[in-house]
Each structure stands twice: as C-alpha cells, then as structure tokens.
Amino acid sequence: MSYIIDISHHQGDIDWSEAVKDVDLAIIRTQYGTSTIDRKYVQNIEACMKYKVPFGVYIYVTFKNGTEALEQAKDFYNRAKNYNPLFYVVDIEESFGASVQNIVQGTQVFIDYLKSKAVKVGLYTGHHFYKPYLMDTVKNYDFLWIPRYSGSSSPGLKPNFACDLWQYTDKGIVAGIKGTVDLNQLNGSKSLSWFTDTDKKKEISLSQYEELKKENKQLKQELTEMKELLVGIKSNAMVSPAHKEDWEWAIEEGVIRGDGKCMNPTDTLTRQQMATMLKRFYDKFIK
C-alpha cells in the first residue's frame, strides 16, 4: 500500500531507501514561522530527490497580521524555491492571539504572494479552525487540505467540509519511519497525478506567457535580420571582383531580375535563361 505522508523533524532520520517503497507523495515541513527552521527539511528534500519521491513543502505559520504574513511568505518561498517543490502549503491552525479579521487578511496575503510566483498553493487548516476563523472566505489557493482523525491508523469520518486532501490519522506506520506519521488520502476530484504534476505540463502565469511571447517575437526579428545579413554577405562573396560592376549594372537596369541579394542560379546558364536575358537587353536598349 502506498501513502501520502506529511513529515517534519519530529519523524527523526527517515530511511528513504525503505520509505520509497510505501510513499507516493511527501509533504515536507520547512519551518515553524520564521524563528524555527525544521532541522530535517534539507535532508528530507534531498532524499526525496535522490529516490525520486514526489514532494511538496509546507510552513506552520505564526503571523498575527498581514505584514508578518508577507514576511513569513517570502521567507518560506525563498527557502524552498531552489528545490522546485511541486507545491507550497500554508498551514494555519492557531490564532496566536490575533483577531479573526487579521488571520483572514494574513492568510490571503500569504497565498496571494505565493500565487504571484506562479506556483501551486495549498491551504491546510484545522477542522475546528475552518469555520470559526472564516477560512471558507479565503480565496486563490489551488487545493484545500483538512485533518479529521479517527483515533486509529485507519480512516474514520471524513471532514464536514469539502476538501481535496484529508489528513485522516497521526498514527500511521510507514516503512523506514520510526514511530508514527501523519497519513492523508485524496478526498475530492483531484487525482494523485494532479499533485505530482505527472498528468500535464507545468502551468505558467499570464505575465510569464506574455514575457515569453515578447521574447519569441524579438528572437524571430533577430533571426530575420541575421538571415538577411548572411544572404547579403554570401551574395557579395560570390560575385567576382572583375564582374561586380557589371553585375550591379545588370540588376539596376533590369537585365537580371531580382534584388541583388540572390545569385541563383549559380550554375552555367541554360539556353532558355540566356535567351531571356538577351530579350530583356534588346527590349531595353535596342528596340
């Protein structure tokens, strides 16, 4: 059986050579606010990369207002971005004395900042926290993750609220992990491949698309200019110095048709081609 797990330094040193056999997706904590950095996050991320275990990252937030939320969001993103996680999750379970209004505002600021980076964003919030702290009014995230434990290692009652990922126990047993671990299962229409990005190409934001389109247009223009330059260089190189003046006269007078940038045909003239050139000369200068 394969699992979706979420982990932190509380799981200690994980034997990923064993865990890889049981784990479909790992969600790795990087920090608790900005003051406590998870002691095992780098080790866990590098192991997932080594054993090709798909992974996302999460932060347990401690902000009390929008300003602190933005600070934590920036720190979280900068800490994880070089590892290219599949998604970023904001885990909000406590108010730390802040008002409901400040919690909602801070959560929205946090999510909006991450979305501005064109990454996939998840919101994790407690089953007891979701309604009282108006988490149902927060918008712009890509998936919702809610816990509701059964009291055993098996799933029990599902969350009362529609969500994409359900954390159903904190008593899971997984190979390579000493002690227990949180286990999760899909709970909505999103497939595992949606989380692991194996069913589609990476999405880009509208601003990224416009920038790529602009760069593509500029590149096409540069290639056109380079092609014209190379054709001109080629033509000039192919005209013998002894015939250059005659060549330019023939082009200018229309005896030879063209813009002077093309030497085709470069082989010996056929009788038909010679006849055409003589007829043009006759029509222009003798007739």
Image (cartoon, rainbow, N blue to C red):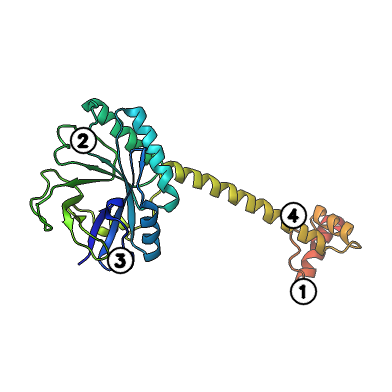
Residue 258 showing in the rendered view: no
Tell me the crowding category of disc 2: few under 14, some 14 to 19, or many 20 or more residues within 10 angstroms, Cα based: many
User: Residue at 45% of width from left, 46% of height from top?
Assistant: 209
Lower position in the chain sequence, tag 2 or tag 3 = 3
Lower position in the chain sequence, tag 2 or tag 1 = 2
The span from disc 3 to disc 4 (Cα, nearest Å) is 67 Å
Q: Between tags 4 and 2, which lies in front?
A: 2
Q: Which mark is residue 259?
A: 4
Name the residue beneath numbered marker 1: 270
Lower position in the chain sequence, tag 4 or tag 2 = 2
Q: Quadrant of residue 97?
A: top left
Quarter of the image with the N terminus is bottom left
User: Residue at 24% of width from left, 27% of height from top?
Assistant: 98
Q: Nearer the viewer, residue 218 or 196?
A: 196
Lower position in the chain sequence, tag 3 or tag 4 = 3
Residue 112, how many percent across, how many down?
A: 34, 36
Q: Which mark is residue 190?
A: none
Cβ atoms at labels 4 and 2 below 8 Å apart: no
Lower position in the chain sequence, tag 1 or tag 4 = 4
Q: Secondary structure at mark 4?
A: loop
Q: Which mark is residue 135?
A: 2
Q: Is residue 97 left or right of residue 32?
A: left
The span from disc 4 to disc 2 (Cα, nearest Å) is 69 Å
Residue type at numbered disc 3: Val
With respect to residue 67, does 136 lie above or below?
below
Q: Quadrant of residue 72?
A: top left
Residue type at numbered disc 4: Asp
Cβ atoms at labels 2 and 1 below 8 Å apart: no
Q: Secondary structure at mark 2?
A: helix
